[in-house]
Amino acid sequence: MSYLANTAGNPNDLGYFATQAALVSAYPIAVPGAFAVVGFTDSIWVWDEDTMTWVNSGQSAPIGPTGYTGYTGYTGAGNFTGFTGYTGTTGFTGYTGYTGPGAGDMVLANAQTNTGAKTFATGTLISPDIVGGTAVGSNIIYKSTTGVGTTAGIAHQFVGGTNGATVAATILNNGNVGIGVTNPTIGALQVSGGQSFTTIPTNTSAIGTMNSTTGWSGQGFLFSTGANNSFSMVWNGSAAYFGNVTNTAQTPWYVINGTGLSIGSGVSVNKLDVSGGAAFGTYGGVNTAPTNGIIVSGNVGIGTTSPSAVLHLKAGTATAGTGPIKLTSGTLLTTAEAGAIEFLTDAYHATITTGAARRTFAFLESPTFTGTVTIPTGASITTPVLTGIPTGSGVASAATASTLASRDANGNISADSILQGYTTTATAAGTTTLTVNSTYLQFFTGSTTQTLVLPVASTLVLGQQFYIRNNSTGAVTIQSSGTNVVRTLAGNTRAIVTCILASGTDATSWSAMYVGISIADGKILTASNTLTLAGTDGTTQTFQASDTIVGRATTDTLTNKRNQPRTNSTTTAGTLAPDLGTANVYYRTTQTETLTISAPIGTPIIGETLSIYVDSVAAQTLTINSTYKAFGSAFPATTTAGKTFMMVCQFNGTDWKTTHSSAI
């Protein structure tokens, strides 16, 4: 490291530096006792060996009149009072070429290099060039005052024009900069003024008053890369224009005013005006929209905030002009286009893909069609109103395959067979409820009971029927909708129920035809007159394979027939009361107590017989009703131990004549 010595010959005096940074840059390390003058602080800085840094001593820099020979070449005398505090003339030779133009003025005829802070009390520094230095990082610092400046006061001002009559730029103490403004108070940079231009320079940026001869005038900015390639924003007091300006014309891309935003269409008259196509969503910046049209990649909602379809319209109201969609009648396409919907006069048309064929919409209110109307496979017509009799090869009143059935002149419909709906249910001691939509055939299987509830009669038409077949071994109870019993079907029986009253909920709304006869295969039951069979549950009527059936109320002769008696057997009891309706032979086994034989129950016929047998383990007292008349000897008073007492009785119209034996 080499050190520069001043002219006084002191090796520790390193001279003058404008700033601390300049001193540190020149001498990052110094010798003990080194010092220098820093102009920015107007004080002497010393080298601190302990901390290895430069320290401000606070000592003012020397400016005495004698011996200050640091400025070489000063050759004039007098009138050199521009530097405040310098009062002498001896040895001040620092400014080469000073020609002494007068008190307070200094003219630097040539480029000068100097260090240190200088103060001009009055006068003018006239120089063609001011250079901060030749080293990297050299700079020029302009300081308006060493005292306390006011925040809004002027720190620096640049003037031009005749003798400085025009203020070109102003810098305030708070840092605000004004171009064409003497008091910039509304921002860090405030610009006013500008000139009309007819030619736009290349690679230019401008801000201020735009007075283009092509029509845009106002305050704004401009960025240009060529005469026909520039971007500008201008506010003219009523609208802000964004767009391209050339030497001969301007093209607004966007215009914003108090009404809204206009894109490519001049001043806006709506919240949003767009001239040309627009793309939204993922189509933006990728796909080109049709001229003056729009393309949208997502759902579109009109009048709704949550569209759930590609196009979702709000509901219409009764107010005129609020319908969700409306077409204007117009000429149909010369060539039909698949998917197109058109409206002409009183008909709407849609074109299908197959053959690009145009089809007409059908309406429920008196539609009129021309040509052939084809209903596609799988389509349906809901509650159409047809006037007149359908005709054509597809309609027939006779039973014709693959045609619609129509009534004949008498209102009859012909069909080879009617395929009726069928439902089967396994009985589970539950309930099956039918409706107007239930099938005609209802079959039940299984081995337990089930309840079937018929539909509400008011939902049916008169004459509507259900065929109910019980193939289970348990009973199926048919009820009305009000849970009234209509019929109970035993196992292997059936019924057809018919709605005869389209109101009410009880059994009177229904007529039931019950069939409970089961005839074996190959057999036939014929009756030329009324056939009535009566009995109780479980009664079986068996007919012989041949011979004649004998009636109850006729006189017939039975030949070689066996009459099998009806018998009743009981153990010991105090009373024996024969019931003629139950048996004609009564047998009492192991009689171990006193016995009373009562008169027979029922109405006997003359000649009817009754037999009574009593076995006694021991002799028991015997009491016999007086209706029994002993034939021969009187009835015994007791039974005989280990023997059977027998009575054989026959009714004579008044009493029972009895033959008896007590020791069989």
Image (tube, rainbow, N blue to C red):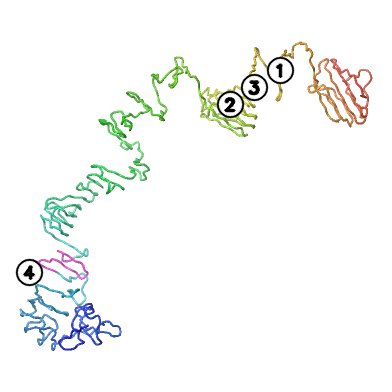
| Alpha-carbon span between mark 3 and mark 4 | 139 Å
Residue behind mark 1 = 543
Task: Tell me the distance, in whole angstroms, between the alpha carbons under discs 1 and 2.
Answer: 30 Å
Crowding at dot 1, Cα within 10 Å, few <14 / some 14-19 / many 20+, comes out as few
- Disc 4 residue type (three-letter): Asn
> Up-down: is 35 above or below 107?
below
Q: Count up the numbered dots.
A: 4
Badge 2 density bin: few <14, some 14–19, many ≥20, Cα 10 Å: many
- Residue 464 place in picture, x, y as percent: 53, 24
| Residue at the outermost right position | 633
Marks 3 and 4: CB-CB under 8 Å?
A: no
Over which residues does the magenta segment extend?
A: 158-183
Q: Which residue is tagged 2?
A: 468
Q: Secondary structure at mark 1?
A: loop
Upstream in sequence: badge 1 or badge 2: 2
Instruction: Locate residue 319 relative to residue 411 in the image: left or right.
Output: left
Q: Is residue 639 left or right of residue 417?
A: right
